[in-house]
Image (cartoon, rainbow, N blue to C red):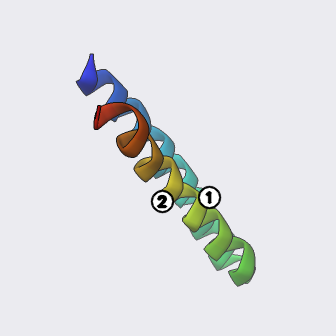
Amino acid sequence: MVIIGWLAILAVFIYTSGFALSLWKAKNKTGAIAVFILALACAIVPYLTYFSV
């Protein structure tokens, strides 16, 4: 079950990072940085709240 959870989190991180990359290519650097920080939060918060217990 833990593996499925991490795979889902990885999929969200990859999808969100890809969107940040497309924003960066479109010269929207502020938006790309914000979306990448959101992607990092999506990867870190589940570890801190669910998987570390």
Q: Say what amino acid the circle numbered 2 marks.
A: Leu
Q: CA distance from mark 2 to mark 1?
A: 13 Å
Res 10 visible: no
Q: Tag 2's secondary structure?
A: helix
In the displayed image of the protein, which residue is found farthest to the top?
A: 1
Residue 40, numbered label = 2
Which residue occupies the foreground of this view, 21 or 32? Answer: 32
Nearer mark to the viewer, of 2 and 1: 2
Res 17 visible: yes
**Mark 1 Cα-neighbour bin, 10 Å: few <14, some 14–19, many ≥20:** some
Rendering coords of residue 51 (x, y %): 31, 33
Kindly identify the residue that appears in the image at 73 percent across and 72 percent down. Answer: 31
**Mark 2 Cα-neighbour bin, 10 Å: few <14, some 14–19, many ≥20:** some
Rendering coords of residue 43 (x, y %): 43, 49
Rendering coords of residue 36 (x, y %): 56, 66
Query: Where is residue 23, by image quadrant?
Result: bottom right
Q: Which residue is label 1 attached to?
A: 19
Q: Tag 1's secondary structure?
A: helix
- The quarter of the image holding the N terminus is top left
Rendering coords of residue 14 (x, y %): 45, 50
Kindly identify the residue that appears in the image at 38 percent across and 31 percent down. Answer: 50
| 16 w.r.t. 23: above or below | above
Q: Is residue 27 left or right of residue 43?
A: right
